[in-house]
Image: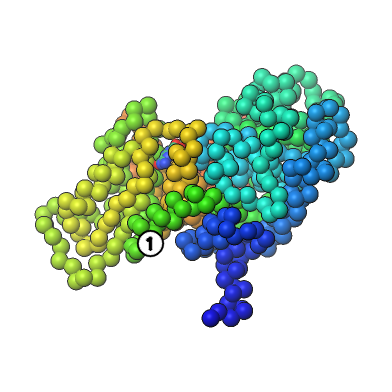
Amino acid sequence: NIGASDSVKLLKDQLLGGLLTAGFDEGSCLSRYQSGVYHKGLSGEPSPNLIPRLRRYEEKHKECGPYTESYNKTVKELRSGQFTESSACKYVVWISYSGLGNRILTLASAFLYALLTDRVLLVDPGVDMVDLFCEPFPHTSWFLPSDFPLNGQLNNFNQKSDHCYGKMLKTKPITNSTVPSFVYLHLVHDYDDQDKLFFCDEEQHFLQKVPWLIMKSDNYFIPSLFLMPSFEPELEDLFPNKEKVFHFLGRYLFHPTNYVWGLVVRYYQAYLAKADERVGIQIRVFDTDPGPFQHILDQILACTLKENLLPDVDHQRDITSSSGTAKSKAVLMTSLSSGYFEKVRNMYWEYPTVTGEVVGIYQPSHEEYQQTQKQMHNQKAWAEMYLLSLTDALVTSSWSTFGYVAQGLGGLKPWILYKPENRTAPDPPCKRAMSMEPCFHAPPFYDCKAKRGTDTGQLVPYVRHCEDMSWGLKLV
Ligand code: GDP
């Protein structure tokens, strides 16, 4: 028997304090409404400016989304190449590209860019995006329609394409050229100095006029947006706490579809829910040989013991007497290989813990190698990232966007396992992250005003070099 004020509070919690909008059919996307039951709630409150800004975006998306009058008009202009600069709706088209962790980070980046430039984000469904994510904006769709005129070219755009912005800059000065109806933005890790001028205000001034921006990236480029004077004031308003940018955007945008949600909920209830504490360990090994490797196992154990995340085992004793109230820990391991999981699980079976704690080790899948185009594979990968985000303490691997997504959604500052060199376990094995933000792996090092190179990790206190990649940038 809950009173009216209780049910208002319940709805407010369900909708993450207003970050999510009501106005969806609950059954179509259960994770939107149930995530609050499994997550510990949001980490901190979103800025009061962020929530109305999201509502305004949703309105705009509804007005400009697929097959609206404005959409049809701009598509027609795209086909003919003739357009009026005053058109009410301009777009960012996000190309589905790279591994799932990368895609989640670039989609959040593209959304924030759309927000800052008053554009509407349309998502190339690729092979599996529809199976992975619910629609985030009500009464419209974020997916690019199947008859969008550039669909046939999306996967072929590259730095040599005539519409590539970097290439355009190389061929002739942009200031006095006519504005094209679309521009391809190449923001992939191999981009060159001209492509990187995207991160300069002067170029943004030109891009502002282009109705369709087609974007391909595999990087979380938000840290560099914070270094642009034209965006910085609004970013400050929307995200006064800079280490929560992906946390809020991620929880706003990324809701697992019902099938993926089933994977999350069944696993959580069966293996994680009853434990006193949950520890996540995300193992990603960037090596041509699939492993498992002894040095990685040594590193995992060294880190979790040193940081008191897991108890040591007692090799001298057969059994530790417990008073019957032993604390339990559930450890969720994710890896393409099952080798680490088996070793750690056996260790806690073969020997008692020194503390008397009961430790259970679980790993949902071991897919052996990356299979980016297989549907079920990425549904499992998404479920595993989400499950990791539901833990109380998280250990992640250097350089892995899979881990970044988990930490960001969970609002967790992980312990990052340093990247091993020459197949030896590094000492120290891991380090606590400065913030829960993902790392931008390929940032520009350019001072747009002075027109020369600069260390962009030294300009402001809230954009720093990453713990796991010395040249990367992250918000702290
Ligand atoms: P990153 O390469 O670690 O930055 O992460 P990505 O998610 O972008 O790409 C790695 C891809 O490999 C994932 O999308 C999965 O398809 C797969 N993968 C890597 N690690 C795991 C894992 O622990 N579990 C599962 N199910 N898949 C994984």
Which colour assignment does the render follow? rainbow
Q: Would you say 42 lies left or right of 84 here?
A: left
Percent position of residue 133, x then y: 57, 47
30 to 74, vertically: above or below: below
Given residues 202 and 341, the one toward you in this image is 341
**Residue at disc 1, secondary structure:** loop
* Residue 217 visible in the picture: yes
Q: What residue type is labelled 1?
A: Ala
* Residue 406 visible in the picture: no
272 to 286, vertically: above or below: below
Residue at 20% in and 52% down: 349
Given residues 315 and 402, the one toward you in this image is 402
10 Å crowding of disc 1: few (<14), some (14-19), many (20+): some
Residue underneath mark 1: 273
Find out if the beta carbon at label 1 lies less than 8 Å from the nearest ligand 1 atom: no
Q: Would you say 469 lies left or right of 231 here?
A: left
Labels in figure, total: 1
Given residues 375 and 114, the one toward you in this image is 375
Quadrant hosting residue 183: top right
Residue at 59% in and 74% down: 7
Percent position of residue 319, x then y: 13, 60
Given residues 152 and 400, the one toward you in this image is 152
Percent position of residue 460, x then y: 61, 47
Residue at 59% in and 30% down: 188
245 to 147, vertically: above or below: below
Q: In which quarter of the image is ligand 1?
A: top left
Percent position of residue 71, x then y: 79, 41
431 to 144, vertically: above or below: below
Quadrant hosting residue 294: top left
